[in-house]
Amino acid sequence: MGFKKEEKKVEVVTPPQDLEKEPLKEGEEETNLDENEEVVEEEILTVEDSSKDLAKRIDEKREEFNKFAKKMKTYNYILTGILLAVLVAALVIALTVGNKEDNSWVTIVVLVVAIALLVASFVFSKFQRKKMDAEGNKYVEFVLTELNKEIYDDPRFSNKTFKLSDDLKSEFDESRIFLNIKGFKAINISEGELDNVHFKVFDCAASVMVKNRPSPRFLGRMFVFNLPSLEPSIRGIFQLKGGEYSYPVDDTDGLTLYEGNNKFSFYGNNEKVKEVLNNKVLGIIKKIKIDKTIIDVIVSVNNSKLFIGFDYSDDFINVPTKDSINLKHVAKAKADLNKVIDIINNISITK
């Protein structure tokens, strides 16, 4: 329950393996990103006792939701069975009793009853769907609220608020990482302050249209931090690339490619962006392991804001309905949040 990659991505664009750097202007110094590269080691995730208690609470709620869903499904089966039986009986009556010359009225009555039953069935099904959607939203809201309490249980966060869903397409578009985003949905929206820096974080799915079909560009968690002391015109994008489901950022018009290869790319429109996405920050990002959970990581600076996007796999970002919550995913979310905090702490412009 939540988001899903619509299907295997269409027309996969293979990132260039070796991007040629633009020649340096007189007086410019080359930014050597490779000097900070370190071997990315396997991440060790520790499941805390509080997460085990969380899993128990979610499992209880999940069982409650599944019982409700099963009950609704049983009602549908019963209703469908009754409806079919009545329709068959109506057809038999119409073809036998109603076929007799003096009993033509029977056919009319049977048809009226059959139509009334069909209408009643449609109304009941619509009512059930609304009720099912409402219960599903309550379950999702409960799970996400409990997860957020666990993940953001840190005194550095304050004034936190939560929304199940909202229209945040304009906020995502402001990151300027992908062009022509058409389909967009955001859920699990939290807002507040991290060490006096205003932030917003949300899970989202963004897609473009390829041959009249949606093709996902980003599915994951986006962090947005306000950097009021940063000039609004300064733009920069750093992407830690991944494999098949990772798309190269393409909203790069007016940006200079500072450095790029098959592992990452770094673009900017002003040398000041290197103060924000400095070598320490880039070193933190490059240590993030691209694996079955993380598709890629995209960090963008635009309009006095910092955007940090973790493109995640389906099973990580979706709310479980059939199986118990994966506690490794909770530990992973905490670990990734700590990386986000490290990035913020090493951006001199915010201090």
Image (spheres, rainbow, N blue to C red):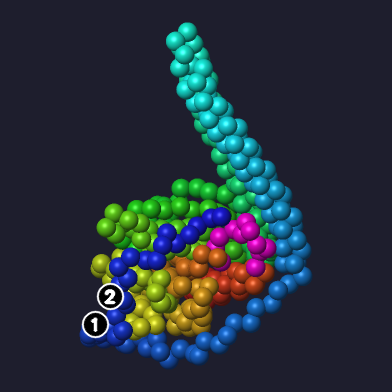
Judge by depth and name the residue closer to the eye, 24 or 177: 177
Q: Residue at x 32, y 70 (%)?
A: 12
Q: Main secondary structure of the magenta part?
A: loop
The disc labelled 1 sits on which kind of residue?
A: Glu
Image position of 38 with respect to 217: above or below: below
Residue 92: % across, % down: 51, 25
Q: Residue at x 48, y 59 (%)?
A: 4
Instruction: Tell me if 114 is positioned left or right of 12 in this view.
Output: right
Residues at marks 1 and 2 touching, judged by CB atoms closer than 8 Å: yes
Which residue is the site of mark 2?
256
Residue 233 seen in render: no
Pick the quarter of the image with the N terminus: bottom right
Instruction: Tell me if 131 is positioned left or right of 206 in this view.
Output: right
| Secondary-structure class at tag 2 | strand
Residue 98: % across, % down: 48, 16
Judge by depth and name the residue closer to the eye, 164 or 201: 164
For residue 22, which numbered disc appears in the image?
Answer: 1
Residue 331: % across, % down: 65, 72
Residue range of the region highlighted in magenta in the rendering: 316-326
